[in-house]
Image (cartoon, grey):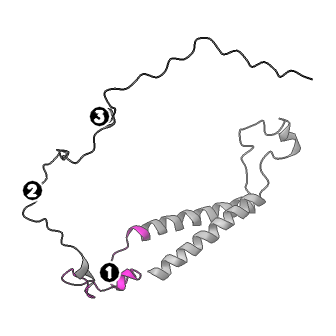
């Protein structure tokens, strides 16, 4: 299954590159100099429909192969079953302990997850009440007797006189 999956991916990449190359090689309908000035392909929107050449037929074949490989990849990717044949990487090869305790006794230093009996159970949705050692808020730290700030002078001071020149 894995080899088929890789083969379909390779086919899809090759068909995608073929489509890109074939589209870039084709000469577009109405791509001559007259089309740039408005005189090209006045009969229909995409030019006259008629026989197609080798490049357009091979582009259609490459597009059909690309579409089929995309559907095959979607089907294979969706129908993977987990089992012994599937490689899960490094973690798939790791043996899980049966009792849930690590095998190397690394869990000996882990604190217990049970709460002591003297601790009351928290009430759902109710925040804890503040204790007595909570510092006071900013409004309570301002002393009651605050002296007002000195009043600003209403008249500006006179500028200093320049020093006399000798």
Which stretch is magenta?
77-105
Residue 30 in the image: above or below residue 61: above
Nearest to N terminus: mark 2 or mark 3:
2
- Examine the structure image and report whether residue 139 is included in the region drawn in magenta: no
Q: CA distance from mark 2 to mark 3?
A: 32 Å
**Residue 57: assigned label:** none
Which of these two is toward me, 74 or 150? 150
Q: CA distance from mark 3 to mark 1?
A: 68 Å
Q: Residue furthest left?
A: 117
> The N terminus appears in which quarter of the rendering?
bottom left
Residue under numbered circle 2:
120
Q: Quadrant of residue 137?
A: top left
**Residue at horizontal 10%, vertical 65%?**
116
- Examine the structure image and report whether residue 84 is included in the region drawn in magenta: yes
Label 2 residue SS: loop
Where is residue 74 drawn, in percent x and y?
Answer: 45, 65
Which of these two is toward me, 159 or 163? 163
Residue under numbered circle 3:
140
Residue 116 in the image: above or below residue 43: below
Q: Residues within 10 Å of mark 2 (few under 14, many from 20)?
A: few
> The C terminus appears in which quarter of the rendering?
top right
Q: CA distance from mark 1 to mark 2?
A: 48 Å
Residue under numbered circle 1:
83
């Amino acid at each position: 299954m894995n080899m088929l999956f890789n083969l379909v991916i390779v086919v899809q990449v090759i068909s995608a590159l073929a489509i890109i190359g074939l589209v870039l090689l084709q000469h577009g309908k109405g791509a001559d100099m007259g089309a740039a000035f408005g005189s090209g392909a006045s009969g229909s929107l995409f030019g006259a429909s008629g026989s197609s050449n080798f490049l357009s037929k091979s582009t259609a074949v490459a597009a059909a192969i690309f579409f089929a490989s995309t559907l095959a990849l979607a089907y294979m990717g969706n129908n993977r079953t987990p089992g012994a044949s599937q490689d899960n990487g490094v973690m798939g090869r790791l043996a899980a302990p049966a009792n849930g305790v690590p095998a190397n006794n690394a869990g000996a230093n882990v604190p217990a997850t049970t709460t002591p009996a003297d601790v009351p159970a928290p009430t759902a949705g109710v925040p804890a009440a503040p204790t007595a050692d909570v510092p006071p808020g900013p409004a309570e730290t301002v002393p009651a007797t605050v002296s007002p700030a000195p009043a600003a002078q209403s008249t500006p001071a006179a500028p200093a006189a320049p020093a006399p020149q000798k």
